[in-house]
Amino acid sequence: MKLSCCNKYIYILLFLYTTLFGAITDKSAIVYYGEDISYPMVGIHDYIIVQPSHTNTHTHGFDVYKNKMYAYVSIGEIDTDIPEYKKIKKSWILGKNRAWKSKILDLTNPEYKKFLFNKIIEPQMKRGFKNFFFDTLDSYQLVDKTDTQREKSKAALVDIIKTFHKKYPNSKLIINRGFEIIDSIADSINAVLFESYYNGVSGKNLAYKKVTDKDRKWLDIQINKIKKHKLDIICVDYLNPKDLKTKSKKLITDIKEKGMIPYISTRDLTTYGFSSKNPIKREILTLINTRYHDRMLQGAHQYGALPLEYMGYIEKLYDVKNPLPKIKNMQQYAGVIVWLTNYSKQPKKLINWLLKVKKAGIKIVFANNFAVADVHLLKQFNIEVQNFTKPNNNINKIVQKSDMMGYEFKPSLSYDGDYLKISTGKALYKIADKNGHTSTLAALMPWGGFAIGKSFIVTVGDDNIWAINPFKFFVKALRLKSLPVPDTTTENGKRLSLAHIDGDGFMNRVEWNPKLFSADIIYKKILKKYNLPISVSIVGAEVDNNGLYPKIAPQLQKIVKNIYKLPNVEPATHTFSHPFFWEKIKNGNLAPKYRLDPKGYKFSLDYETNGMLKELNTKYIPKEKPLRAHTLFWSGDCQPPENILAYVYKNKILNINGGDTYITNLHPWLSYIAPIGLGRGEYYQIYTGAQDENVYTNDWHGPFWGFRKVIQTFKLTNSPKRLKPIDIYYHYYSGSKRASLNALKDVYNWVEKQNIMPVYISEYISKAMDYYTVSISNDKKNYLINGMKDLKTVRLEGLKNYPDLNYSTNIIGFNDFETHRYVHLGKASKAILSLSKSNDNAYAYLVSSNGKIEQSSFNKYGFNLKLNSHVPLKIQLHIPKDCKYKLTSKASKITKKDDVVSLSYKYKKKVDLDVICRP
C-alpha cells in the first residue's frame, strides 16, 4: 500500500455530497497520504492512516486526534527517494520491487531490525506519533525462493511485530495483510488492513481493475482467519474518480455487510476518500490577493470570516499570487468565495479555473466584485452585459429586492457599472434607470451566487456596513448545510467571561501619587478586589534588572511576585522587548527601531517567548502554584507571520491578541466584530473577545473613561446573536489615571452581575483552537461530533430541535438564550447528538452551571457530574418528579421552579453531583 506517484494522471473530479452512506455509529477509516491534513475531514474516523513525512505534528489538529492517527511505515521495502535510504547498507537489500521502484529488505538481518526501530520508528515516536501502520509485510515473498527462506522471513516478521508490541505496549498497530502470520501476532495488533476486495489496481501503470471471484474467495479464507481473533478489518478498494459517485455507495454497503470497515478512494491516496461515515464539509476556500495588504487586513477576513464561523464553517484564505489549487485536491471545501480587492491580473485563467470548480459541483460566490475587469468573461456563468450606456448613477428605481437586502443598511441606488442580466437563477437585488434599463447586482444562481458593489457592503465614512444579510446569503448561495455549531462563546449554558492584561505601562507613575506605580494600583484595586480569574502578563524589559529601568527593577519585581501569588491570577508573557512589527523579524533578528531597546540586549525570538515563560515560572511564580506560564500575548501590531506561529506551536505555547472587536452604539456594525482567529498555513492566531482600553480611549489620548464603552461591545456581541465571549482586556497603565481606573471598575462591576462562566485566557484559547479542527458527521437527525477536547458546547440555531437524551451520548443537557439553544457536552471529546422535535421532560439534565465538567456520566436513569469552577458554583438542574439529586456539599441557597432546581454556593467551587431516576 505504498504511496503511489500518480500525479501525471489527469483525474476527473466528481464530488459526493457533504454526508454519505452510513450510520454514524459504524467504525470508519481513512488513508490519507497527502499534505496539509484537513482535520475537520479526517477527525470523525476511528482509524486515520497518514504519511508521517507529510504530517505536521506541531498542529492543534494533530494534538487533538493523535490517539487515532497511525504513521505509515514500510517494513519490507524502502523507497530510494526518502532520506533514510542513504543509511541503508547494501547487505540488507535483497532485490527490487519494480512496480514501486523500491528496494526489498532482509527482515532476518538483526542490523536491519535495529535500524528499523532506531531510525524509522523511534524518530516518529519522538515527533509525536503513538500508533503505526506497517506496510509491505509480504514483500519477502518476491525474493525468497525456498520454503526455508520464507519461513525465516516469516519468523523475523513475527519477531518485529512482537518486539514493537513489547517495546511500546501503549501503542496501537495496524498491519497490511500479513495473513500468513496472523495466528502468531494477533495479540500484538489492533487491526488488519488489506486492499482490493472488489476493486483494485494492477500492473506497472496501476490500472484500475475488478477483483476476480477466485481472488475474492481466497481473501474470504484469510478474512475468516482474522475474524476468529476479533480484530477490526479495514478493506481499501480503489475506484476511478469518474465512478466514485455511482459506485461508492454500493461498495461501502457491500464491504460493511462482510463485517469489514470500508475505505473507498483513488489510487494515489492523496485525496479524501469515503468510508462508513463521512464528514460534513466545514471549510470554505476564499480567494484573496495579498499583494497590497496582509491577510489579516483583507475584507474577506475582517468581514467574511465571522458570519461563516457563526454558522459553523471555516474560512480558508487562499492567496491568488500562488498557483490555484488542483481541482482534485478540493474535496474538503463546502464552497468557494472569490473576494478580491483588486481585479485579477490573469482573468481568463481565473475564470477557467472557476468553471472547473463549477463543473465539479462546488458552489461559488462572487463577493463585492466579479474579480475580473471584463464582465463579458462571465457569460458561462449565465451573466451577460447588456449593451446600454453605463448608468453614471442615473438609477432611480428598485425593481426587485429580497428580504436579505437592507440587513444593516439600505443598498445605495448609486451605481456606475455595467448593466447585468442573468439568464438563470433568482435576482436578490435588481435596479433600473430612468429609461427602464435594469441591472441585477445580487442573485442566487444554480452554481452559487453573487452580490456586488453596494448591494454587498456599503461604505459610509470609515464604516463598512452589510447591505446584504451575510448569514442568509452565504448559506443560500453556497447551499451550506445546517449543523450543530461548535460554539466558543458559551459553556454549560453560560456566556464565557475572560480577562487579561498586556504588560505595558507596569512602571507608569500614578498621577495622584507619583510614589506609586500603575501596577501597584491594578494589583490592589482590581486583582485583589475582584475574584474573577484573570491572565496577567509582563513585558520583561519593563521589570528586568537588565531592562529599561534597572534602578527601580527590584520594586517592580516585588509587585510582579505579589500579583502572581494571587490564586485567581494566571501568568503569561507579553515578550521581553515588546516587538512592534513581528513581520520585521528577519533571520531571527529584529532591529531596535522595531522594539524596545534595553542596553546590551541582542534580540532572540527564543528569549522573547520561551525564555520569558521560563523566567516567569522560575523567578516570579511561587513553586507551589499549579498555574504555570505557557501563554504568549502578542505585542505591537499583533501580526505574527506563519514562521513565528510555527515556532510558537512547535514550543507548545498558546497565543492570543489581535482582532479589533470594538463594536459600540455609535458604530453598531458587524464589521466591528472580529472572527475567532486567523489561519496562516496550518496554524491559528487566536483573537481577543474585545479590544483593549487603548482603542476606546483613542490611543490613550482620551477620554480616559472611554473603556466604559466596552460594556456596549459586550452587549452588542451578545444579542441578537451571541458572537463573542466577554473579555476584559486592558493594560497596566489603566491604573495610572483616576478616570481610567474608575472605568475599569465599572466594567468589572457590570461583568460580575452577568450570567457568566469565568475562565482563564489559556482555557479559552484551547476552546478556540478546537473550533478549527472539530469534525462532524450526520445521518438525518443524528450527529457525530468529534474533536471537542476543550470546547464543550454546540449551538442549535432556533428552538425547533431538542437533544434527544435517550439516544444521545456525552450530552449532559441544554439551555436556551433568546433564539439559540446551547447543548452541553460531557468530559469526552466525542459526542452523538440526536435531535428531536419535542422535549422529553422525563429526563434529568444539566440546565446550566458556571463550573467546568471534570467528570461525567449520563443515561436515562440519571447522571453523575464533577463540577469545578473558578468562582463559587451556581448550578441549575432539570429534575423530573421521579428523580432525586445528591450533592457532596449542600448548597447555600436552593430554589425550585417547576422542574428546575437552582443551587447556589457562597464559597464552594467544587461539587460532585449525582442524579438518580427511578427506572
Image (tube, rainbow, N blue to C red):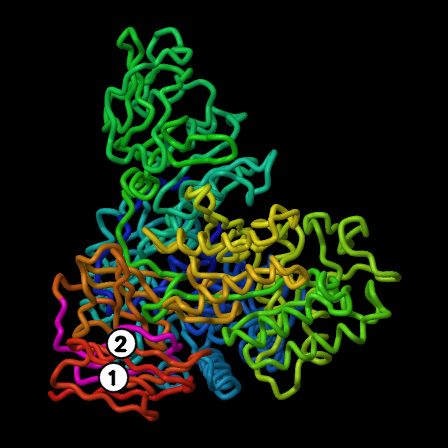
Q: Residue at x 38, y 57 (%)?
A: 41
Please name the amino acid that badge 1 sits on: Phe
Dot 2 surroundings within 10 Å: few (below 14), some, or many (20 or more)?
Answer: many
- The stretch of residues the image draws in magenta is 839-862
Q: Is residue 401 magenta?
A: no
User: Which residue bears the numbered disc 2?
Assistant: 846
**In the rendered image, is residue 98 in sight?**
no
Query: Is residue 669 left or right of 719 when viewed as pictured?
Result: right
Query: Is residue 784 left or right of 527 when viewed as pictured?
Result: left
Q: Quadrant of residue 57?
A: bottom right
Q: Residue at x 38, y 31 (%)?
A: 456
Q: SS for tag 1?
A: strand
Q: Along the polypeptide, which appears first: circle 2 or circle 1? A: 2
> Residue 863's mark?
1
Q: Quadrant of residue 809?
A: bottom left
The reply to whether the C-beta atoms of the residues labelled 2 and 1 are less than 8 Å apart is yes
Q: Is residue 840 magenta?
A: yes
**In the rendered image, is residue 598 in sight?**
yes
Q: Position of residue 546 (x, y in %)?
A: 84, 68
Q: Nearer the viewer, residue 678 or 750?
A: 750
Please name the amino acid that badge 2 sits on: Leu
Q: Nearer the viewer, residue 859 or 190?
A: 859
Residue found farthest to the front:
512
Determine the CA span between mark 2 and mark 1: 9 Å
